[in-house]
Every structure is written in C-alpha cells, then in structure tokens.
Amino acid sequence: MAQQTVGGVNVDQEQVEFGRKLFAGNCQFFAGSTKLDNLPPPTLPEIAFAGRSNVGKSSLINALTGQTALARTSRTPGRTQQLNFFNLGDRMALVDMPGYGYARASKDRIKDWTTLMHDYLKGRVTLHRLCLLIDARHGIKESDETLMTELDQAAVVYQIVLTKADKVSKSSLSEFSKTFDAMRKKHPAGHPDIIATSARKNVGIQELRASLAALAAPQQFI
C-alpha cells in the first residue's frame, strides 16, 4: 500500500474509491454522551476526532461526509460539550469530541468533558483510531503533546491530521513533517502518515477518507 505523507500524495486508488463510496453513504447522528455510563453500545469500529478548540473538527467531519451541517460548527470555543456519535452506513462510527484548550464554559463543565474525553480515549474497546487535529498555522502545542503522551502510554493509535492547510505554504507543511519525524521516537502510538487537509478547499479529504475507510474493511487492503 502506498504511503500518504505531507510531502506528497500517493495512495492506492482502489482504497480511494472505497473511501469515496463509504463516506458518500448514509451518515446520521445517533448518540450524544456526557458520561461514560451513557456511551452507546460498543458495536461498530469507531474513529474519533480530537483537537484544540476551534481546530476544525466539525468542519472536517462535514467535509468527509459531504454534508454541510452533520456536525455542528461554531466560532465559539467550547460549543461541542459531549461526545457526538455518527453512524456511517452501519460500517463505522465517527465521534466528534469536545475541544481542549480555551473554551467559553465554566471550569467545572470543562473539567467534566475533559475527563470524559480522556477516559473514553483510554478505555473504549471499539476505538480503532484517533484523528488528532492540528491547526497547520500553529503546529503542535503543549496540550497536544500532553495528549499524545497519554495515548502512547495507553497504546491508542492516533493519526495527525493537519487542518486549514490552505492557509500555509507547502514549505511550512514540509517543515512540519520533518519536525514530527524528529518527534516520532517519543511517540510510538503515532501513525506514520500525516495528512494535510482543508475542509474549505477540499484538500486531503479523499486521502483521509481512504485511510479511515481501510479500517472498515482491513482484510481488503492487506
């Protein structure tokens, strides 16, 4: 299987087509959880999306599914305050998580959803991958690296997905790739491929679809 990196797009076309068909299918919200004891039953493979507040999680989910309002987007940090689950064609579930970092909410409320997020990430048996979204303009922040270290310790696979890549130069994206390569020894649970995306410009969307769709049919792409 060809590799997808920031420096150049080169993915298997069969996998791209499988991803296109999967994400073009029916996708609907089916559960919102504020506590571990009201999570939906762990049946479908789950792909979670996490990142700092306003990194573009909801916009990316909407772009992946070709919908404009599946996941709620807002300019207000902290609008997503629960784990939102979306059923993608009965093949997998997409999970929109609360952002971390600055949010317009009470300290107690932020603490509650942050604890929920971390407990879910470290204990959900059906979580197949976490997409860790990083704003391409700002790079990896201390809060991102703290989460990465926790995921390494819990052996939870995460893949860095750069957002808003249309707002930076190709040389900046290449430099980020080199920086992450240097960090990789410290983060063994990190997926080797970085995908640069722009929900606004539809950049990197088909590559991310292909990467995630393979988790719904792993035997097909061995």
Image (cartoon, rainbow, N blue to C red):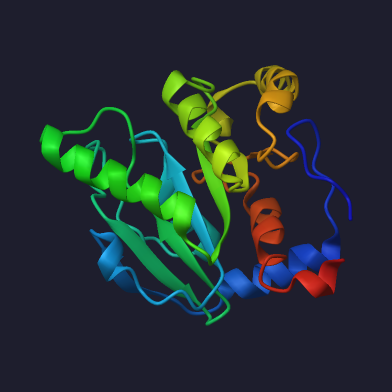
Question: In screen coordinates, is 94 left or right of 39?
Answer: right
Closer-to-camera residue (128/74):
128
How many discs appear?
0
Give the residue drawn at x 85%, y 58%.
12
Could you say where residue 154 lies in the image, as x and y percent from the top left? 55, 44
Location of the C terminus by quadrant is bottom right
Picture quarter containing residue 129? bottom right
User: Which quadrant does the N terminus fall into?
Assistant: bottom right
Residue 43 place in picture, x, y as percent? 50, 78
Q: 105 above or below 85?
A: above
Residue 143, relative to residue 29: is it above or below? above
Q: Is residue 198 visible?
A: no
Question: Residue at point 68% right, 65% down?
Answer: 215
Q: Is residue 110 above or below residue 130?
A: above
Quarter occupied by residue 181: top right
* Residue 132 image offset from top left, x and y in percent: 53, 41
The reply to whether residue 26 is in sight is yes
165 left or right of 74? right
- Residue 79 appears at what percent x and percent y? 22, 46
Q: Who's the residue at 39% across and 33% down the image?
A: 52
